[in-house]
Image (cartoon, rainbow, N blue to C red):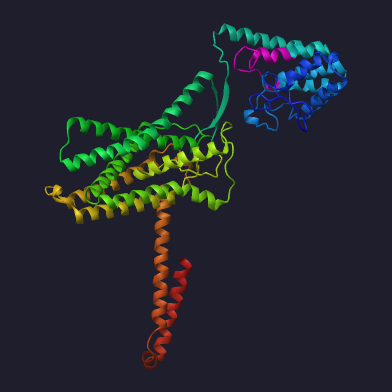
Amino acid sequence: MKKRKPFPLMYSYYGTEYLGAAHGLSSILQMLLSYHEHLKPSDQELVWQSVDFLMEQEQNCNWPPELGEAIERENELVHWCHGAPGIAYLFAKAYLVSKKPQYLDTCIRCGELTWQKGLLKKGPGICHGVAGSAYVFLLLYRLTGNSKYIYRAQRCFEVFCIYCQSNHIEEPYVSITKKRQIPKNGHSEEIEKEVGQAEGKLFTHRSAFSRASVIQAFLGSAPQLTLQLYISVLRQDVSIGRCLFMVLSLLSIVYGALRCNILAIKIKYDEYDVKVKPLAYVCIFLWRSFEIVTRVIVLVLFTSVLKAWVVIDILINFLGFLFYPWILFWCSGSPFPENFEKAFSRLGTTIVLCFLTLLYAGINMFCWSAVQLKINNPDLISKSQNWYRLLVYYMVRFIENAFLLLMWYLYKTDIYMYVCAPLLMLQLLIGYCTAILFMVVFYQFFHPCKKLFSPNASESFQEWLKCACCNRRRRESCESAENTDLRSPTDREETPSSSKISSMPSQILNTDELSSA
């Protein structure tokens, strides 16, 4: 036990101050009250102060698992391990020792909440099952003699027998998750699902594998593919082994980019029940394949003729994407993220953030990173769909690829003597445009959460074109107004009346154009 304010007595389990019966303070206080007469008067006072303070933590007849935590109604725990069914024993003991009615009233409220919330579906056990709820009603019957608690205990026993006869294997730890369905006809329903310990571990392993595949793809396979293709171009020879190795590297990169896309969707729309269709996987695969292949070939061609200048291009790209999340973080003025992992110190947090930005830069060197870092966000991920950032990235990348191909065309050496350079440049640019086309098709037709986009990809692109056209019309209107004002004085003296008459419609037209723009 450790003393802390305002709690006279407090217990910390692995750094967390739990309140429930399984890992928290309530069972410890219950044991202390069981041997109340053996404690010193000063220690007894500390125990009662702690019991009263724990009673003050009640929220809607229930207690949160952790001190200071607010109860969310959709994730409320009413178990013996965490919640009212386990804490009821403490106040029952407090009533038996002190005979104060407030403790009995609190115990009764715990029993009523347990009955109102219904029987647990997590198994027959005590910790978070039917038996843990049934024992509360037996306890209240012994305290009050009210027969309704015996009736409730019998109903729990009936469910206990049915549960055991169904040969259902109880999960030691089961959590209930709620997901919203993708809106249909403007309506969205919530789905409740039990996630057992085995399923939770499998989900954790899958997530870890997805992240590992992304890291291996862009920090391992991508540089390796570029190097092998560069060697093949210089030697003008591709062996079967090297060709097979490059194909495997390319598949690894494309798979990593695909997993990055799926990971981004699940992070951004975590509260929804997301189901990715097979056509969406096909569309992402084609999008990423064309994008990565054209990017790697362009870098290899440019490197083969201008070895020194490619270092500058890579540094500009890599350092730009490496420091971009940090620049946004410093401009936001947000405090440094603390304890997004409890075991990490400030130095450990900094190292993890640096590694994430390193991976982010490595991905964006070759293709668009679907997961956008946002350091001032507690989740470290931007959950908004920023179409303009996506548009700017692909426009700048297309211009960069075209410029690198132009430099290759101007400085190409004899090793490309039998290569039709203009045709190759056209094919690569068309290939990159094909990747953009598959990307637009995916977001417009096959994205599992496309109904949540506001606006969607085509509407955003149309809005951008509309803004560009409006700006052009403004410039043309200003130029026509300046030309009218700069007419020569001789022309004005020769046709004074006609100039006045002709200037008025132009002014009216300009006003209409400006108002419409």
Residue numbers of the magenta segment: 114-136
- Which residue corresponds to the image point at 20% horizontal and 30% vertical from the top-left? 241
> Is residue 70 left or right of 517 when viewed as pictured?
right
Q: In the image, is residue 116 part of the stretch drawn in magenta?
A: yes
> Is residue 65 left or right of 292 when viewed as pictured?
right
Q: In the image, is residue 200 part of the stretch drawn in magenta?
A: no
Number of marks in the rendered image: 0
Q: Residue furthest left?
A: 418
Residue 456 appears in the picture as rendered: no
Q: x, y (%) of residue 32?
A: 79, 17
Q: x, y (%) of residue 359?
A: 42, 39
Q: In which quarter of the image is the C terminus?
A: bottom left
Q: In this view, does 329 lie above or below 212?
A: below
| Viewer-nearest residue: 139 or 460 | 139
Quarter location, residue 106 = top right
Residue 356 appears in the picture as rendered: yes
Q: In which quarter of the image is the N terminus?
A: top right
| Viewer-nearest residue: 506 or 119 | 119
- Which residue corresponds to the image point at 18% horizontal and 31% vertical from the top-left? 240
Q: x, y (%) of residue 266?
A: 47, 34
- Which residue corresponds to the image point at 46% horizontal and 66% vertical from the top-left? 516
Quarter location, residue 167 = top right
Q: x, y (%) of residue 195?
A: 53, 22
- Which residue corresponds to the image point at 56% horizontal and 27% vertical from the top-left? 177
